[in-house]
Image (cartoon, coloured by chain):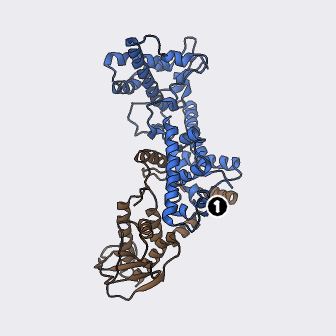
Amino acid sequence: MKNNSPAPDHEELKALLAKSFHSEEAENVPALPETLRDRIRGQYGQTRAQGQAETAALSESLFAKIARLFTQPQFSGAAAAIVLIAVAAFLLVPTKDDSTNSNDFRGLETPSSTTATIILYGFDSENASSIKELLDPKAAEILQNIAGEPSAEGATIIIDGKAREIQGYTSRDAEPIIIALPESEAKIADAIAKMLETLKGK
Amino acid sequence: MNRAGEPDTEFFEILWRATFRRAKRPVEGVLLSDEAATNLAGKIFENLLDRYRQRPTDAEFSAEAMEGAHDHARHNVSADRTSQSDPQLCHDPSDTRYEKNLDLDRLKKKGREGFSDREWNGLDPILRPFGFHTLLRKGLGNHDAEDVYLETFAELARERAKDGTAPIESIVVFEEVIPLFSKMVQFRAIDWRRKQSSLKNQPNTQSSYEDLTEREDGAMQFEDKSSDPDRDLGQLSFDEIYRQCGETLNEMEWHLVFTVYVSQSATMGELCADEDILLKLGLETNHSISKKRRILNEALEGALEKLQKCLIT
């Protein structure tokens, strides 16, 4: 396992760099005025309008957002694992009733299983480790043999490097949903997010 | 094209919030209203958009915005306090370090006999706890601390030979007198220690505080925050870091450091997928993600190392 983490004495510097832009204090910061946003967009041509940004943010899968967090160096593995499980849980919680007011969480039945097991199989060790790192070391496991899988309670996702596919199971006995494994390792997290959404819809 | 990549579409939103916060609290103890901070941040953005017809690097734009917020907010508060004759205007009500602000205009008022306004009588009770806290922490006994404290207090109002101004004239709002005085006291304490050891060993071979600050050529400003060897890095803001170390990193290194650690507008994964970044790091798109991350981490670590050295030296 390569040690890519910067020297410990940079932690103070990193915290210092982040401090200027990110406040821990809960302050009501007004939004960037529309006139300025328009001017920036017109002049530099890169920035989206807030509405567009929000739309894009909403259309981006929740898992993809979390997956982006996993790749941030300052986002610790342990925290990432908790978030991944929490997200998986959120996505897999069946809605009680589509017509139910989404703000009303009272009385929601707890499903018997709310997490997804993620298995990596059929990759060489370097690729497996890097994909695992990309997802999160504690949320995914590397197996040399997937005979008998899925074996865990609840949903399981098998990322099969040999067959170049991702198999999603809503339960141990369910038929798999199969999607192609992206060529780029960086896009695997997005594919997993899609699979989670698909499993949630089942 | 000034930027190495375009992974930061929300950059201006993030910078806006940071600029607003800086405008709202330019220094500890000063608090502007939301409305005043919003107006100021808006004007700063407009000025920068006028100045930079082509988009500069995010680090440059940010440093300018943050510095502008810091400067203008303080000067606006100062002007309002003067025009309304209210030194307490925009003072953070949650700041309980001392009872109330003194009138900085009166403290700065210079007569024939120098700074002799009666407002100075109120400054000693405010500064004494801060000065003694620092001096006792530096290991000076009560008696020595009293001497050093009084020397430093007098120094606040002593005109420097090089420009004829006194340290008290360098601050814009009263709240800045505490960090200014604390830094001066720290240097006085170091000077005191040097004097003690030189008396024991080789008398008269060390430069005194006065020698260093009053000499005609190369007089040192010990109250300047960048000259403080004991300064806490945690007190620096990004614009100060950028001003101090702008030349230390190249544009690519600033882009990486700024994107990942300052604005956090892109993740390592996104940077690894950015073709411009990969090209500049000597990577190709078909390299493995682990190799990309390793090279990117090395580049980032190298940049942080340089930055750290710059800030310490």
Name the chain letter of the residue that bears numbered label 1: A
- Rendered brown, the chain in question is A
Task: Please give left or right for residue A114 compared with residue B301 in the image.
Answer: left
- Point 30% across, 81% down: residue: A151
Vertical placement of residue B99 versus A150, above or below: above
Task: Please give left or right for residue B34 compared with residue A114 in the image.
Answer: right
Tell me, yes or no, if residue A188 can be seen here. Answer: yes
Q: Nearer the viewer, residue A13 or B94?
A: A13
Q: Amino acid at mark 1?
A: Gln
Name the residue tied to disc 1: A46
Where residue B195 sits in the image (x, y, percent)? 42, 15
Where residue A73 sits in the image (x, y, percent)? 45, 57
Local SS, label 1: loop
- Rendered blue, the chain in question is B
Vertical placement of residue B209 versus B274, above or below: above
Vertical placement of residue A176 versus B243, above or below: below
Q: Residue furthest front?
A: A124
Where residue A106 sits in the image (x, y, percent)? 31, 73
Q: Quadrant of residue B128?
A: top left
- Point 49% across, 44% down: residue: B305
Q: Residues within 10 Å of mark 1 (few under 14, many from 20)?
A: some
Vertical placement of residue B43 versus B142, above or below: below
Q: Nearer the viewer, residue A125 or B60?
A: A125
Tell me, yes or no, if residue B86 can be seen here. Answer: no
- Point 35% across, 61% down: residue: A78
Q: Where, quadrant-wise, is the N terminus of chain B in this rendering? A: bottom right
Q: Nearer the viewer, residue B89 or B27?
A: B27
